[in-house]
Amino acid sequence: TCNKIYSLLNYRMNYRLPVVITTNLDLFEIEKHLGKRTTSRIVQMCS
C-alpha cells in the first residue's frame, strides 16, 4: 500500500540508506498511483 511504501522510504531516508527506484512512469503518474506524500518523499531523496 501507499502508506507502507512511504514508511519504507522515510525509514531509509532517515537512516541515510540507499534506495533504487526504477519506473517508466513520469512524476505525475507516480503521484497518481502512490499519492502526493510518497511522491514528494521520492523527489526529496533525489535532490
Image: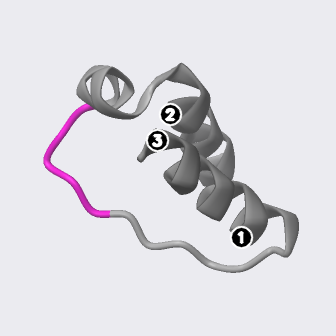
Look at the image and say whether residue 45 sits in the magenta stretch.
no
List x then y, in percent, for residue 21: 38, 64
Q: Residue at x 50, y 33 (%)?
A: 39
Q: Nearer the viewer, residue 33 or 25?
A: 33
Q: Who comes first in sequence, dot 3 or dot 2?
A: 3
Q: Is residue 20 left or right of residue 23?
A: right
Quadrant for residue 38, please give it: top right
Mark 3 neighbour density, 10 Å: few (under 14) some (14–19) many (20 or more): few
Q: Spot the residue most to the left.
A: 24
Q: Who comes first in sequence, dot 2 or dot 1?
A: 1
Dots 1, 3 in contact, CB < 8 A: no
Q: Residue at x 38, y 25 (%)?
A: 31
Q: Alpha carbon of mark 1 to alpha carbon of mark 3: how far?
A: 15 Å
List x then y, in percent, for residue 18: 62, 78
Q: Residue at x 27, y 63 (%)?
A: 22
Q: Main secondary structure of the magenta part?
A: loop
| Range of residues picked out in magenta | 22-26
Q: Which residue is mark 3?
A: 2
Q: Is residue 45 above or below residue 29?
A: below
For label 1, the SS is helix
Amino acid type of the residue tagged 1 in the rendering:
Arg
Q: Is residue 33 left or right of residue 34?
A: left
List x then y, in percent, for residue 40: 60, 31
Q: Alpha carbon of mark 2 to alpha carbon of mark 1: how far?
A: 15 Å
Q: Which residue is mark 2?
A: 39
For label 3, the SS is helix
Amino acid type of the residue tagged 3 in the rendering:
Cys
Closer mark to the observer between disc 1 and disc 3: 3
Q: Who comes first in sequence, dot 1 or dot 3?
A: 3
Mark 1 neighbour density, 10 Å: few (under 14) some (14–19) many (20 or more): some
Q: Nearer the viewer, residue 16 or 46?
A: 16
Q: Which residue is mark 1?
A: 12
